[in-house]
Amino acid sequence: MGQDSSTIEVAIIGAGPIGVELGVAFERLGVACVVFDGGQLGETIRRWPPNTHFFSSPERIAVAGIPIPNLDQTKISGEAYLAYLRSVVEQFDLNLRLYEKVERIDRRDEMFELETNALAGRKSYRCRHVVLATGGMAAPRFLGVPGENLPHVRHIAPDPHTYFRTRLLIVGGRNSAVEAALRCWRVGAKVTVCYRRPEFDREIVKPHLFAEVGMLIRQGQIGFLPERTPVEITPRDVVLAPTSNGEPIDRPLLREPADFVLVCSGFVADMSLFEMAGVELRGQRRIPAWNPETMETNVPGLYVAGTAAGGTQQRFEFFIETCHVHVDKIVAAITGRTAGPTGLGDSRRYTIPRENAES
Ligand SMILES: Cc1cc2nc3c(=O)[nH]c(=O)nc-3n(C[C@H](O)[C@H](O)[C@H](O)COP(=O)(O)OP(=O)(O)OC[C@H]3O[C@@H](n4cnc5c(N)ncnc54)[C@H](O)[C@@H]3O)c2cc1C
């Protein structure tokens, strides 16, 4: 196994928006840090359905005070954001180790030992501080019903054209399900949505999606099967059980024919590194224990940043714009200094040059 002999001051695990923002903050202060990712830069966003646009406005998802250039002042796509993240990394020449998954973490003599699985083989590192910025969307949440692994069933929406002139059953009732229903219907799929609740939740589904899907359902353009949940998927149809309060009840089953099935039932976080390091994980959502002033976990020297702080989230409390503050706290806790701009920081408050202001 390759051993990196030098000690890393700060190892950040996860090169998503918040891991990158933290890397820039340390870089600006001259603190040696390495950012690891098991996939590419922004791996979570890479897995989004193609051409998905952020719900958040660009200024809220900008990192390290660097504005996101976009030509039409609208919400940007995941692809545009990946290009932006790359430009941030290049600008600060961050020390990234991509396609290098951290598989083991041990705390010894007040230091951490990391073992990674890189393209070139296994490696180990010694680090003084570790930040877990591993995100909260490691894998789709499976329904756990027979047939869910059949080839015509997906858990992340592909390019909507995949479903042109086919019967598509979408399972779910949150933003991803509703957005997929609208996009697939627009490219000529015959879409039916099955949801375990009687109606979509206005508090969760974005207003513009809610209004549009409601109208198309009322017009009969998109099918809607409320209070139903799949209990089996076959190559020809999906067996649906009636539900009450979201839970299956003992009533006759329904068979809904479908050529393809798209299960949009959310994602789960991978908290295995937290567990391995001895971080206390609370409840079903496996929320790590952390100090709200510093983001340090119950393991001294081990911090959490970004959406990982919420474990597996049900209602999104942690997303990019609510996590910039983690960067400030961690930098202050480790260095005793103030991080440079985070989010869009001060760069948003531009001043009119004096000569223009006076004229
Ligand atoms: C369709 C869709 C739309 C969304 N829209 C928005 C939106 O509008 N606004 C918003 O704020 N959020 C949105 N989100 C959620 C968004 O993806 C997250 O908020 C964001 O990615 C979180 O950033 P993060 O840095 O905390 O973690 P992530 O971006 O999840 O980054 C974590 C990184 O850690 C890496 N990693 C994990 N484990 C290891 C390991 N053991 N070793 C090495 N690397 C590891 C992963 O590969 C990943 O790159 C959306 C999500 C989806 C699916």
Image (tube, rainbow, N blue to C red):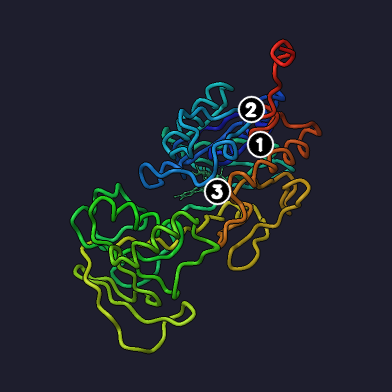
Measure the alpha-carbon separation of dots 1 and 3: 21 Å
Nearest the eye: 319 or 1: 319
**Vertical position of residue 201 compared to residue 345: above or below:** below
Which residue does the image show at 30% across and 74% down from the upper left?
232
Counting from the top left corner in percent of width and height, residue 155 is at: 36, 58
Q: Residues within 10 Å of mark 3 (few under 14, many from 20)?
A: many
- Is disc 3 in contact with disc 2, using a CB cutoff of under 8 Å? no
On the image, numbered disc 2 is attached to which residue? 6
> Which three-letter amino acid code belongs to the residue tagged 3?
Gly
Point out the frontmost of discs 3 and 2: 3
- Give the structural element (helix, strand or loop) at label 2: strand
Does 132 sit left or right of 245 as displayed?
A: right
Counting from the top left corner in percent of width and height, residue 262 is at: 32, 60
On the image, numbered disc 1 is attached to which residue? 127
On the image, numbered disc 3 is attached to which residue? 135
- Give the structural element (helix, strand or loop) at label 3: loop
Measure the alpha-carbon separation of dots 3 and 2: 27 Å
Measure the alpha-carbon separation of dots 2 and 1: 9 Å
Q: Residues within 10 Å of mark 2 (few under 14, many from 20)?
A: few
Asked if the residue at label 3 sits under 8 Å from ligand 1, the reply is: yes
